[in-house]
Amino acid sequence: MGDMMTRCQPWLGTFVEVTTDRDDAIEAAFGAIATVHALMNRHDRASEISAIDGLAIGEAITVHDWTAQVLARALFWSRMSDGAFDPTLTGDWRCVDLSGRDVRLRRPVTIDLGGIAKGFAVDCAIAAMQAAGTPAGLVNAGGDMRGYGPSPWSAVLVDPTTRIAVATASIDNCALATSAVRPSGDFSHLPARRAGTTSATVQCPHAIDADALTKIVLSGSARTQECLATAKACALTIDAGGRISGVLPLDRAA
């Protein structure tokens, strides 16, 4: 295995770091991330998500296979969690009809895939590096991470309100995602958060699922354990006092 190198670029509303041993593999990873960004950025009027939001009732649009995959998984987790995971800003996720790559709306809906697309982009970047033939790699998109290779990678988990390290988790050919309140304590970006919980971290095979599951864990949904089991995932939470609860394999910070 060659010397590891890390490159960082702004994508997906955050900074994305890609680590592996070859420049061409890093470029392939960022190329995949750029495609996801272009397709699913709700702030871009040229994106497919914006096109879906502009549909007339009953009108159909055929979307890219990646957009269809993410939307399908988002709707899956919405159903599994009884709406604790919700890929809409306005309207009702149950009014989104997806058949293959064709999308229709039964009522006006504003879709936001920001709670799951970042994880999907991480998965796509990993697939691009593996296709390039690199033996090991890590992608970190603002806390949505996935790594592969003969040796595990490590990730430091912090109390989101104090930024103090509380544990180190292992990323051993798997994904790890964290959703948390902002350092100021603001949780407006996490409308379903259970009171007293400041952070949720999920480990599972794929980042797309880890990304969505953090929101379900934060919500305290009665179906959380069922959802985690479905994705072969484990999770931990941090509360307002910095206390850790959960079963994620980790080393506690000193």
Image (tube, grey):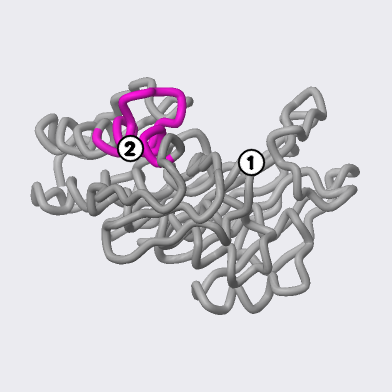
Pointer 1 and pointer 2: residues touching (CB < 8 Å)? no
Q: Position of residue 86 (x, y in %)?
A: 61, 53
Q: Kindly indicate the quadrant of the structure image that contains residue 71.
A: bottom left
* Among the two numbered marks 1 and 2 on one chain, the one whose residue lies closer to the N terminus: 2
Left or right of 82, for residue 168: left
Magenta segment boundaries in residue numbering: 35-52
Q: Is residue 118 above or below residue 202?
A: above
Give the residue type at disc 1.
Thr
Numbered-mark total: 2
Give the residue type at disc 2.
Glu
Residue topped by disc 2? 48
Q: Kindly indicate the quadrant of the structure image that contains residue 49.
A: top left
Q: Residue 155 — which label?
A: none
Looking at the magenta stretch, what is its main secondary structure?
Answer: helix
Tell me the residue at 15%/37% (across/down): 28
Mark 2 Cα shell of 10 Å, populated few (<14), some (14-19), many (≥20) = many
In the image, 136 versus 208, the foreground residue is: 208
Q: Secondary structure at mark 2?
A: helix
Task: Look at the image and say whether residue 133 sits in the magenta stretch.
Answer: no
Q: Position of residue 122 (x, y in %)?
A: 35, 45
Q: Position of residue 204 (x, y in %)?
A: 48, 65
Tell me the residue at 46%/48% (across/down): 57
Mark 1 Cα shell of 10 Å, populated few (<14), some (14-19), many (≥20) = few
Tell me the residue at 68%/75% (across/down): 225
In the image, 29 versus 74, the foreground residue is: 74
Residue topped by disc 1? 90
